[in-house]
Amino acid sequence: MEPIGIFILATICQFYSCAQNVSDSVERMQYASVAGEEYLEGEKIDTNLDDKVYFDFDKSTLDADDKNLLEQYLPAIRKAKIVRLEGHCDERGTREYNLALGERRALEVRDFLIIKGVSGKKIRVVSFGEERPIKNASNEKAWAENRRVEISLY
Amino acid sequence: MKRSLIILIFLSSNIFSLLEIEIIKGSDNLSKVAFVPFGIEENVNENYGEQISTLIEKNMLLFGEFENLDKAEMLSFPDSEEDFYYRDWKIMGVDYSVIGKINSVNALGNLNISYSLFNINRRIKILEGEIVGRENNIEGIAKIISNRIYEKITGLKGIFDTKLAYIVNSDAETYQMCISDIDGKNEQILFTSAAPIMSPDWSPDRKKIAYVSFENGLAEIFIQDLASGERESIQALGMTNSAPVWSPDGKSLALVVSFSGNPDIFSYSINNKRLVRLTNHYGIDTEPSWSPDSKKIIFTSDRSGSPQLYEINTQSKRKKRLTRDGNYNARGRYFPDGKSIFFVHGNDGNFQIATKKLSSRFIETLTSTSLDESPTISPNGNIIIYATKDGSKGYLGGITLDGKSRFSLPVKNGSVREPAWSPLFN
């Protein structure tokens, strides 16, 4: 009885490994789009302002300097069609939690802008968690630079 | 000549990362196993005898759980019980001996192989088996024999026919969703993208993998069929969909949907595409995973002010906090027996893999590097593979939970992360 059972198993195993010739579906797309809206590089508005606000580890609160910077953005934002806020984290901790934390950081910026009178409809929020670091290194300086929300106006 | 060279180059560029397990530290008192070259009957290719015993030996030594007796030190090469003398092995300090014979090969290329396992200290044969398999699938046959030997010696299911899914980041702009056999062989690239890929998880039948891809500019969950290569985006609502994990029956995914920026845990039925809310809190709720009996889902929440692990009863929706020590306990998973959990534990700025019995409040840290994450457990509950870093390069580390072995799976090119161990092959 056993040899037959194992024979079937061995045959299925073999069939299974053959059936797994998965084609490499290579698709290269620009990630600079949110929910299907494409932004061309040329349309990005240059504000001459620092385009990032930074955060403490596992925190999403804005300090006085961040708020000050965001207020300087307000005149340019009024003229812009779209405000894109991209939340990021450092590499520490878990990836999925950081994805949520990056979103929380971007939302903190969005909420501040809404309080200052910016229409929420203009604002696009996306999080890349820890997947897109600026500095690929494991030290305090790199981590501090990577915990950020990037602001771009279009 | 020229043609074969081209094929070679093509093949080697496909073998991209090639994870090969390197044992870092084995225990001093491992069981010693002798893998005697199998005997062969007439008409059988004479190389097969040594080939199959060598394959079984490689499997059994893969995770550093056993040591072997070198062939050069063997006093005899028995291929049947009549020729087997316990004293030949006892004197060499051997605990178990594996012998076997390739009895025949038929016109269809089917090999008939018998094998036996002896416990030298107890002086008894503890396993005897016969297997018929294809001549061109000796590796597959060796895996089945290895699984049976492993199970007989350890009492745990053998895992030599399992697979590993992982993400390779060969350069800043190339992300690849890969799978390979657990020994690193037969690597396949399922999907390549210029945007990040995250959170792979196997369907219980091993036919599909769910993962997150940013190819459309935001986190989106895809299910990819391994046989056809077809990918399907699951069109859940919300801004961000992430952290998909299959239910034990394969009919649902636990996942995270962020409606207007508040991530909560949902159960998503794959057939009728229905989304059932499981948590509703203004804090971050993420990283769900089912208990083996499907009754509970473990998840990470920062509702207490720092990420901690909770479990929710999927029927009563009652929640229970599982971790209290330290200010970072995240991405929990249940052990296959459902009695313990493993997760990422942050302590003094180090992030390490830890376990905890559900019945106890104590956390046990398993690893000693500082950026450990994404732990995945072997289906027999004995080995954890996790992602860690050396400088800017990500690699995979592993540890057996009985403390017998530590190992690493370095990648040849780029960084590798987010390992996901496949279920057993049923």
Image: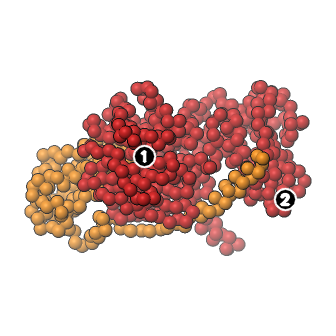
Mark identifier at residue B391? 1
Residue B172 placement: quadrant? bottom left
Type of the residue with mark 2: Asn
Q: In this view, does B210 lie to the left or right of B266?
A: right
Query: What subunit carries mark 1?
Result: B
Q: Is residue B374 left or right of residue A106?
A: right
Q: Position of residue B93 (x, y in %)?
A: 75, 28
- Among the two numbered marks 1 and 2 on one chain, the one whose residue lies closer to the N terminus: 2
SS label for mark 2: loop
Chain in red colour: B
In depth, the one of A88 and B210 nearer the eye is B210
Q: Position of residue B121 (x, y in %)?
A: 76, 26
SS label for mark 1: loop
Q: Please report the residue visible at 17 percent of the width from the left and 52 percent of the height from the top.
A: A111
Mark identifier at residue B116? none
Residue A121 placement: quadrant? bottom left
Q: Please report the residue visible at 39 percent of the width from the left and 35 percent of the height from the top.
A: B345
> Would you place residue B241 above or below residue B128 in this image?
below
Q: Name the residue under label 2.
A: B106
Is residue A1 visible in the rendered structure shown here?
Answer: yes
